[in-house]
Amino acid sequence: MRIYFRIIVCLSFFLFGKGRAFAQNEFGQKTITGGITHSLFRGIHKIKYRDFDPYFKWTPGFQLHADFALVRRLSVGFGGTFHHHQLRVDDYSFEAGTSLITENFTETIDVFAGYGRVLIHMKEIYENSLDEVDVYCGGQVMFLSYRTHNTSSDPSLNGESFDIREILAMVGGTRYFPTDFIGVHAEFAIPGAYTFSIGASF
């Protein structure tokens, strides 16, 4: 953890050096972003059903976060995400006494996540950079809470509830502001409750 934040601090000093900041990263700037997310890591929920036929229904997640510029190229923020995954398992079989039962069922996985983050906003990364573009990278600490439930009649498949208190993730993204107050954004985070997100910034 200590090494992680040292890297962030060193990079921020490097980026403070020269050149102007993008318009969306000026002192005192506050940016609120919301959007839909998708997780490439949700496949871990298939593992215990790998001998059957598990597949996900399309269920995007949702994200809301706020970032506050401390100085021209460094901001801190916090936010949260929610995902409601639906895993369908076909041809699942289990023994009940002397009988073999085969069924199809759905398992729902609710994932709540909260996070804090530190972002470094890049200086001009190419000639004639647009003032309307903000490109950033950094790190975030994420706290996850999982809740699962299924419709199976197998008594051994109980719902689960567990928490993961600390996940360190890399995060990066870009925002484009066609107007002074409203823009669009795209972001990735690895690892974590979401892998990428798209949405609107204010």
Image: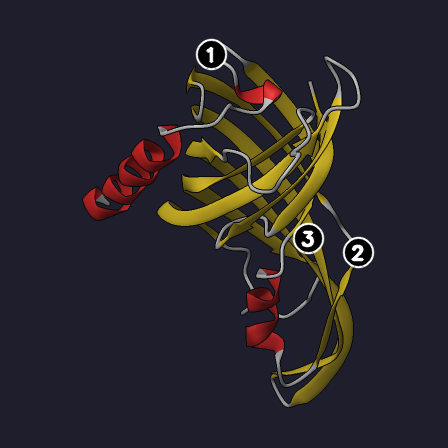
Q: Amino acid at mark 3?
A: His
Q: Position of residue 56 (x, y in %)?
A: 74, 64
Q: Nearer the viewer, mark 2 or mark 3?
A: 2
Residue of label 3: 85
Residue depicted at x 78% and y 72%: 104
Could you tell me how far apart the alpha carbons at marks 2 and 3 are, in whole angstroms?
Answer: 8 Å
**Tag 2 and tag 3, C-beta contact below 8 Å:** no
**Tag 1 and tag 2, C-beta contact below 8 Å:** no
Secondary structure under the numbered disc 3 in the rendered image? strand
Binning the other alpha carbons within 10 Å of mark 3 as few (below 14), some (14 to 19) or many (20 upward) gives many
Q: Nearer the viewer, mark 1 or mark 2?
A: 1
Q: Position of residue 128 (x, y in %)?
A: 66, 34
Earlier in the chain: of badge 2 and badge 3, it is 2
Quarter of the picture containing the N terminus is top left
Could you tell me how far apart the alpha carbons at marks 1 and 3 are, in whole angstroms?
Answer: 39 Å
Q: Amino acid at mark 2?
A: Trp
Residue of label 1: 27
Could you tell me how far apart the alpha carbons at marks 1 and 2 are, in whole angstroms?
Answer: 40 Å
In this view, the residue in front, 37 or 112, is: 37
Quarter of the picture containing the C terminus is top right
Earlier in the chain: of badge 1 and badge 3, it is 1
Residue 100 visible here: yes
Residue of label 2: 58
In this view, the residue in front, 179 or 148, is: 179
Residue depicted at x 75% and y 18%: 182
Secondary structure under the numbered disc 1 in the rendered image? loop
Q: Nearer the viewer, mark 1 or mark 3?
A: 1
Q: Amino acid at mark 1?
A: Phe
Indicate whether 13 appears above or below 41.
above
In this view, the residue in front, 133 or 79, is: 133
